[in-house]
Image (tube, grey):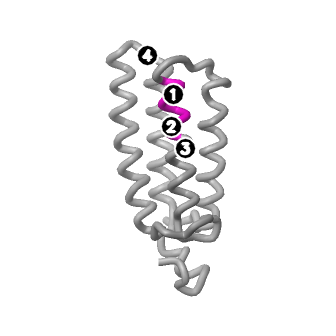
Amino acid sequence: MKIISSKVHGLLDYATVVFLLAAPTIFKMEGTLCTLTYILAGVHFALTALTAFEVGLVKIIPFKLHGVIEIVVAAALGGVALWFKNNDNALGFYFYSGLAIVIMIVFLLTDFKSAEKNTGGAYR
């Protein structure tokens, strides 16, 4: 069941960027965990801003490719979570495990054809 439209997906992406920028302060992150979270915020912002959908700023990356990139990132974040676990960083493990799960759920619920439907095919 694909209940998230491209526009809502984009708004969730920007909210994720804000969350990632605030997370180091909220969760008192330090060191590698803090740095990686800020880097991820920048990457997620760039991906969203460059995606060809209603809330994209430059519209270069097709929305379907955006989805593929996000699912690859979600899998990578699962690996990052395990790396933090192996380095005795429980906060990093739980933070990145949760983030990976949320990104996967959003991926599974997103209608990646909706950008084409909602814009008359303008964003491919």
Query: Helix or strand or loop: what does disc 4 sit on?
Result: loop
Q: Are marks 2 and 1 in contact (CB under 8 Å)?
A: yes
Amino acid at circle 1: Thr
Residue in view at x 43 percent, y 24 percent: 93
Numbered tag placed on residue 42 in the rendering: 3
The alpha-carbon separation of the residues under discs 4 and 1 comes to: 14 Å
User: Which residue is depicted at the point 50% across and 20% down?
Assistant: 91
Q: Amino acid at mark 4?
A: Asn
Start-end of magenta stretch:
33-40
Spatial separation of the CA atoms under disc 3 and disc 2: 5 Å
Q: Which mark is residue 89?
A: 4
Q: Please count the marks in the image.
A: 4
Decide which of tag 2 and tag 4 comes sooner along the chain: 2
In the rendering, which numbered label is found on residue 39?
2
Alpha-carbon span between mark 2 and mark 4: 18 Å
Label disc, if present, on residue 98 of the rendered structure:
none
In this figure, which residue is indicated by the disc labeled 1? Answer: 35
Residue 114 position within the rendered picture, expressed as x and y whole percent measured from the top left = 54, 74
